Every structure is written in structure tokens, then in C-alpha cells.
């Protein structure tokens, strides 16, 4: 059984335009979003380490893989 509501083209256009309206940041409520208030964890510090390890591994394969 299909329970999907059918919309006229005008209703569909109104729905799509309503979805495209950007969020109003003046009325944002960060107190209701505790994840937005948390400081970043230590995971972002691992990115430079990972890049250096990949570069070292690539150079090792290049020079030692002959």
C-alpha cells in the first residue's frame, strides 16, 4: 500500500524552495547543541603525524624497492 502523499507541482516547488532557505544563524541555539560547544579532541593532532608516516613509508618504498 502506498502511503506517500502526492503533491501538486506548485506544492512540490514550495516544498523545495522551503528546503533551500538557509538556516538563520542569528536565532541559532548552541546551548541545545552540546556537541557544538565541546572543544576539539586530540584526534586532530594525529593528522600531521599520519601525513609524515605516509611520506616516510612512500620514500622508503621508493628508495628501498629497487
Image (tube, helix red, strand yellow):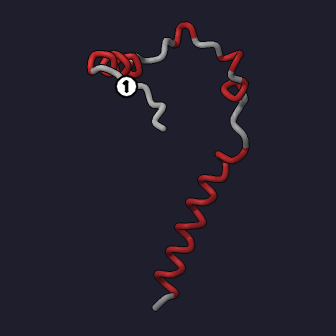
User: Which quarter of the picture shows residue 49?
Assistant: bottom right
Residue 41: x and y in percent read 72, 40
Residue 53: x and y in percent read 60, 66
Q: Residue furthest bottom?
A: 66
On screen, residue 20 versus residue 36, left or right, reads left
Q: Which residue is mark 1?
A: 6
Residue located 28% across and 16% down the image: 10
Residue located 48% across and 84% down the image: 63
On screen, residue 8 versus residue 61, left or right, reads left
Q: In terms of depth relative to the viewer, which is nearer, 51 or 7?
A: 7
Q: In terms of depth relative to the viewer, which is nearer, 44 or 17?
A: 17
Residue 45 against residue 60 in the figure, above or below: above
Residue 66 against residue 34 in the figure, above or below: below
Residue located 58% across and 13% down the image: 28
Residue 56: x and y in percent read 56, 71
On screen, residue 49 versus residue 60, left or right, reads right
Q: In terms of depth relative to the viewer, which is nearer, 6 or 18?
A: 6
Residue located 52% across and 67% down the image: 55
Amino acid at each position: 500500500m502506498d502511503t506517500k502523499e502526492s503533491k501538486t507541482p506548485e506544492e512540490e516547488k514550495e516544498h523545495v524552495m522551503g528546503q533551500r532557505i538557509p538556516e538563520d544563524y542569528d536565532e541559532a541555539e548552541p546551548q541545545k547543541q552540546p556537541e557544538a560547544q565541546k572543544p576539539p579532541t586530540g584526534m586532530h593532532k594525529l593528522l600531521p603525524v599520519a601525513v609524515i608516516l605516509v611520506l616516510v613509508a612512500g620514500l622508503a618504498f621508493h628508495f628501498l624497492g629497487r
